[in-house]
Image: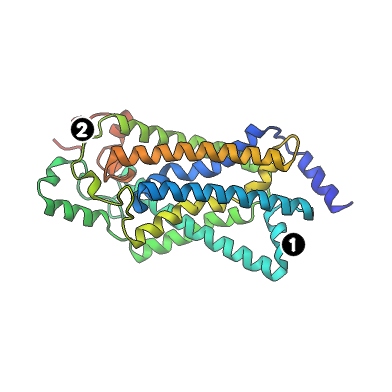
Amino acid sequence: MDYRQLVREFLEDADWSSVDESALLLFNGLCGYGVVVVPFALKQVGVIPGIAYFAIICLAWEYTSRTLLMMAAEQGCSSYAAVAERAFGARGFLIATVCNFLFCVLSMSFMLQIIGDVAPPLMDVEGFSGVYKEDPLDSSIHEDDDHVEDFQANDAHPPSDSERATSIFVAALIAFPFCLNYQLRSLRILASFTIAALAPLLFLVVLRTFVGVPAEEHGEGYGAGWVTPRNGLGLANGVGTLCFAATFQHQVFAVYACLRRRTVARFTQATRGAGATTFAILAFLGIMGYATFGRYLLPSLFAGYEVNDVASGGSDDEGGDGTD
C-alpha cells in the first residue's frame, strides 16, 4: 500500500474533529509551562521586555509550525522526525534530533530549577536551593537595609553540583519522550492531565494575590524592573524559560490530525486562536504577579506560609511561619 495512503488512513482514524479541540492542545502546550515560568521570566528580564519576548516567541512558533506542516504535506510525512529526515537527509536528521533534544534538556533544566524552588517549601523540605531559612513575609526582617541585603543573598543561593547534575538528568528523561513522540492520540490524555494538575496551582496564585498578601516596601528593589533586566544571567534564564514553548513541535501534527477538514487555513485558525488566548492569559498573570507580589516570587510566597494556610487562604495571623 502507498505510504501516503497509510498516512491518510492514520489521520482519518483520529477521533478529534474540531478547531476548538485542536486549539486545546496548543493552549495546553503553551500555558502548561507558562503559569510558573512567565512570572519568573518577568522578574529576570523586566516586565515590558518580557512581554515583548513572549509575543515574539508566540509569533515565531506559529509561523514555524505552519511552515513545518506545509513541508510535511508536500512530502507526505506525518511526524516531526520524518519531516526533518526528508528536509535535511540522514546526517542532517541526526544533527537536528540531537540539537532538538539538547534544547529540550536546557529548557527543561530551567523549568526544573523553578519547580525545585516551588516544591520544597510546599513539602517543608530544608537544605534544597531556593528554600528560605527566614520567613520572607515577616516584617521584622525588613527593619534595616542590611538585613534585606542578607535575605536577598540567601534568596539567590546557587544550587550545588549534585543538584545541577540531578536537574540535568531528570530534564533529559523528561525531554526524551517529547523528541520521539509518535502517538498522537495519547497527547489528548496528556493535555487533560496537565490542565487538571495546573488548576490547583493557578487557584493558589490567584488566591494569594487577593487574600492575605502583605504590602512590601522593598518590593520593587529585587529582581528586574519594568524595563531593565536583573543582570546578564537573569536575562538568559528569562529568555530560556520563555523559549520552552519551542519544544512542542510534535504537537503540530497532533493538532492537524484533530481537524475535521484538514487544511492549512483551519490549522492557522487553531494556532492563532490558542496563541492569542494563551498570550493574553499569561501576560495578565505575569503583570499581576509582578505588581502584587513585589520582589517575592511564587516560592517566596509558599515558603512564608504553612501548606494548610496557603490552601485555605488564611491571613498572616493564622499562618505565617507557624510560630507565635
Residue 236 numbered mark, or none: none
Q: Amino acid at mark 1?
A: Arg
Residue toward you, 313 or 253: 253
Q: Nearer the viewer, mark 2 or mark 1?
A: 1
Residue toward you, 115 or 22: 22
Across and down, in percent, residue 90 comes to: 72, 68
Q: Horizontally, is 167 left or right of 305 in the view?
A: right
Q: Earlier in the sequence, mark 2 or mark 1?
A: 1
Above-or-below relation of 3 to 293: below
Q: Amino acid at mark 2?
A: Asp
Above-or-below relation of 46 to 269: below
The kind of secondary structure element at disc 2 is loop
The kind of secondary structure element at disc 1 is helix
| Residue closest to the far left | 144
Q: Quadrant of residue 262?
A: top right
CA gap between label 2 and label 1 equals 60 Å
| Residue closest to the far bottom | 91
Q: Which residue is mark 1?
A: 86
Q: Quadrant of residue 208?
A: top left
What residue sits 26% from the left and 46% below the top?
A: 295
Across and down, in percent, residue 246 comes to: 55, 53
Task: Answer yes or no: is residue 185 visible.
Answer: no
What residue sits 44% from the left and 55% below the top?
A: 239
Q: Horizontally, is 126 left or right of 33 in the view?
A: left
Q: Are marks 2 and 1 in contact (CB under 8 Å)?
A: no
Across and down, in percent, residue 255 comes to: 66, 42
Q: Quadrant of residue 135?
A: top left
Task: Answer yes or no: is residue 247 visible.
Answer: yes
Q: Which residue is mark 2?
A: 316
Q: Horizontally, is 59 left or right of 119 in the view?
A: right
The C terminus - image quarter: top left
